[in-house]
Image (cartoon, rainbow, N blue to C red):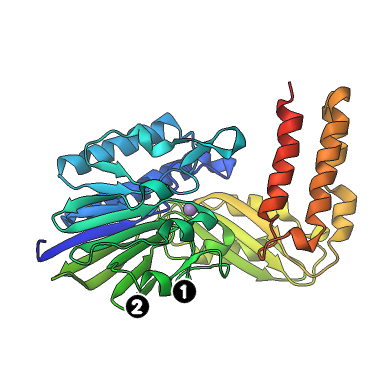
Amino acid sequence: MSSEFSFLHFGDTHLGRNSPSRISKKRAESSVEAFEYVIEQAMERDVDFVVHAGDFFDSPNPWPSVIDSTQQKLDRLEEAGIPLIATRGNHDRSYGRGRTLKGITMDIYESELFHVVDPKKPEFPEFREPVDGVRVYAVGYHSDQTPRILDGFQPDAETFNVLLLHDFVEGLTRSYEGKHTSTDILSSLDLDYVAVGHDHDPQAPYRRQNGTVFAATGGTIDYTFNLADARKGYNIAHVEDGEVRELEQNDIPQTLALEKTQVDTADADPDTIRNEVKDKLRTDSAAVKVKITGEADPTEIPSQTIEERLEELEPVEMAEVLTSTTADVKAEIDRGGFDLLEVLDEHLPDGEKDEFRALQQKATGLMDTPANLTDSGNLDKSGREELRREAEEVLYED
Ligand SMILES: [Mn+2]
């Protein structure tokens, strides 16, 4: 093994992410720009290889323009002789019927130095060796199967071992006890660096345990309100004599920033809010989200006027107002809310109405029973499977 080398770690680039639709082009561009920035850094800093921890693309069908600009950047990396090893995130795949894996989007790239590693249990461990004596293993997104795939894994004690994971890891990210692997389990193996993707706001983005470095870089372009302040970064690890001597945790500049403001108000005056946001703007291109809290009745808040006033500001590409007030919001839903059954009745042909109504009622019924829900409030696996079976019958019975 060379006694000194460095590598760059990033992930969750969600290339081509294009929501919200009002600024889809800007959004997709900003994802590519963040990616390009990191690849530039890899070349400038002359790292020996790059690892990507999954969710390379945002969807299984990225825009051709996104595929092209990414390919150009990968070509530059290839010319520089820097290998990139990636694993599959939950966004990088498409499924066929019965949830069989149909394809991995990253497979469209055929550069010699671009590798996707995502073995299932029978093929694991599979690895790449970007530098003599350095092994990069990977397990893409396999949800609650990950512990089973890792069971019995014994990396070579003589090599510098990197593991890429696109999953939650107890002790580093959010996790649901017993469903995911943990830093305790992984640090008992001969692993030197574990690069973790999937959680865009990891609780502990860095941790050294029993000689193993665990690192989660989060996403590169996060936009949702709760992630506005989350780190958007990449790491460069410097290795000497088989040990990580230094871990740089760097930020990625955002070409489309997200500014969020929380206003606690009873009257939500558009001018006051506009001035408050104006003072906070630090970039020349930003999407703005304003969350209004307090006791105001949400139906009395002039959301549209606030959004219009904000969009008059030069750098604001789009403004959105969220209301999270303590007033009784049920009144609002009753007045102008969305009723799925009503919409189905209006738009479906007569022959299909009953089937879809039954399906919707089935879903609601399952969700009403706490025993069917996971800790995070989603439908659990058996509930999802049951619903999927019924949905497939309705959708594909012909
Ligand atoms: Mn992701």
Is residue 322 placed above or below 30 in the rendered structure?
A: below
* Alpha-carbon span between mark 2 and mark 1: 10 Å
Q: Residues within 10 Å of mark 1 (few under 14, many from 20)?
A: some
Q: Is residue 157 above or below residue 288?
A: below
Report helix, strand or loop for mark 2: strand
| Residue extending farthest bottom | 210
Which quadrant holds residue 110? top left
Q: Secondary structure at mark 1?
A: loop
Q: Residue at x 63, y 61 (%)?
A: 290
The answer to which quarter of the image holds residue 81 is top left
Residue beneath disc 1 = 171
Q: Is residue 209 above or below residue 178?
A: below
Q: Which mark is residue 238?
A: none
Residue 393 locus on image (x, y percent):
74, 31
Residue 253, visible in the rendered structure: no
| Residue where numbered disc 2 is placed | 209
Does the residue at mark 2 contact the one at mark 1 (Cβ under 8 Å)? yes
Q: Position of residue 66 (x, y in %)?
A: 40, 36
The residue drawn where x is 61% and y is 36% is 98
Residue at x-position 50% and y-position 48%: 90
Q: Residue at x 49, y 51 (%)?
A: 142
Instruction: Pick the quarter of the image with the N terminus.
Output: bottom left
| Residue type (three-letter) at the residue carrying disc 2 | Gln
Residue 198, given in percent of the width and then of the height, sits at 47, 57
- Front residue of this view, candidates 288 and 388: 388
The location of residue 85, given as percent across then percent down, is 29, 48
Q: Amino acid at mark 1?
A: Gly
Say left or right for 353 vs 322: right
Residue sticking out furthest to the top? 398
